[in-house]
Each structure stands twice: as C-alpha cells, then as structure tokens.
Amino acid sequence: MPTFGTLELTRVVDRLPAMRDLDTEAWALPGAEILQLAFEVPRATESLLPRAMHPAIPPYATIWVTRYAESPVGPFILAQLRLMGRAGAHPRGFVLGAVASTDGAATALRERWGLPVVPGQVAFRRRHDRITATVMRDDVTVLDCGLIDPEPISGGDVQYIHSVTLAHAPLDGKTDPRLIQVDSRYTIKKAERGRPHVGVLVPSAWNAEPVRTLNPIAATVTSSDTDLPRIRFVMDVEVPVVRGTRRIRESREE
C-alpha cells in the first residue's frame, strides 16, 4: 500500500501565505547561481508532508539557496528548505520554509507563488575551495551550509525537482488552503559538484520540526537562467493528487 503524508492542516493553517490570485505573470530570472544540498532526514518528517503527497523513500530534504542577479524586484537571494516527496508518480519538493534577502522579494514570492517566505539576512559566497550560504533572522544564524571542494560536471548531470507549496489561494470565488505547483525551467550554463556540509540548521526557523540532517547525499552548484512561472496546477491538500489536481491553464505561456 502507498504511504501518504500525515500533516494536520489545522496546525499550520494560520501561518500560510495568502496569494492574491492564481494569475501572476512569469518572471524571467537570468544569471542565477543555485546551491543545492541533499541529505537524509528522519521518518518522523512524514508529519510535515500534506496527506495528498507520498513521502520519499528513504526520506530526504534539500536546502536550496539561489542568488538571483536580476528580477522585477531587483537582485535578491532566496534560501529554501524542502521536504522531498511525490505528487502521484511525480517527484516534488514541498517547501517547508524560506528566507529572502529583501522585503520586496519576500512579499512578492508570498503573494504571487504562495511560497512561505520571510525576510532575513542571506549570504551566498564563492571561494576557490567552497561555496557557502548563511541565513540569519533576528541576529541568529538559522542556516550555515556549503559545498566543499567543487569540481566541474556536465549540466546534464543536475536535475532540479519542481516545488509544491501550501498557501491560501482563491479559486471559484472561495479562498482555501491549496497546494500550488511551482515548475520553474532551468538552462544550466555551468555546473559543479562537491561534498555537502551543514554546520547549522535550526528546524524551528524553517517550520521544519522534526527535520534533522542525517546522511549527506549530494551537493551541486550551477549558473543558470531560470524563471518563476505562471501557475498551471493546484491540488487539494487532503485528497491524493491523482484525484485532487485542478489544471488552471494549459500552458505556461498563455
């Protein structure tokens, strides 16, 4: 029998982002630098995943830190913690928490794509032997991580899994908690891999109890042209996505 997430919606409903509508325009985001770290997490993290989704086996999470060189709200850095799972047969990353380096980016990402973003201090640094990222909130470090000893690889060796986020979203005249698919595109121009390192991860700052970093899996960093897309699919939080998915539009371009 398939297993499902066990998230109790009543526990999180009061802190969910509120989307203004499901008709946001796409953002082109050229020249982005993306650091991704993957690591195993305890099985107890099933309690963070919506009932509509299946946990990954073994359970794992990704830290995603992206430095956007340009955007409609100016340059910013976005850090995300995602619990990986499946929506039906499709792998997806459920966004637990996120921090943006500017207030304008945090507001836009919450209202347009339903990402659970708060403002904070986010740094992305590249050195000859490592790429590091740190996140601070209220003068407290809540993330300190990096990729050690980068070495070049083919961009075809890097795969980015689409995100799903949980937000209050209006549909058919009614606003309810819904799962929103954020399926960005990536044109990778340069890619490197190395050893993942997580020195600090404060789960409570990412809405992520009981996440703990267990076995490291992989770390990559890329230079990419990417985007934030028009929304095509929304899903019921409690019903398996094979029955609870609603198509909003046929194409990202329409």
Image (spheres, helix red, strand yellow):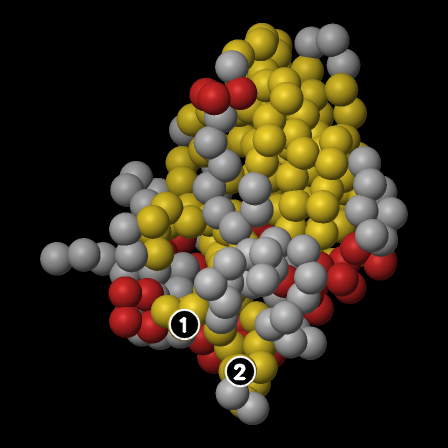
Residue in the foreground of this view, choosing between 76 and 7: 76
Residue in the foreground of this view, choosing between 27 and 18: 27
Q: Is residue 127 left or right of residue 177?
A: right
* Circle 1: element type: strand
Q: Earlier in the sequence, mark 1 or mark 2?
A: 2
What residue appears at the point 46 percent right and 21 percent down from the top-left corner? 157
Q: Pointer 1: what residue?
A: 246
What residue appears at the point 53 percent right and 82 percent down from the top-left corner? 171
Percent of width and height locating residue 210:
46, 53
Which amino acid, by three-letter code, is at mark 2? Answer: Leu
Q: Quadrant of the N terminus?
A: bottom left
What residue appears at the point 61 percent right and 12 percent down from the top-left corner? 150
Location of residue 157 with respect to 227 vertically, above or below: above
Residue 35 visible within the image: no
Q: Is there a contact, CB below 8 Å, between mark 1 and mark 2?
A: yes
Percent of width and height locating residue 73:
85, 53
Q: Pointer 2: what residue?
A: 171
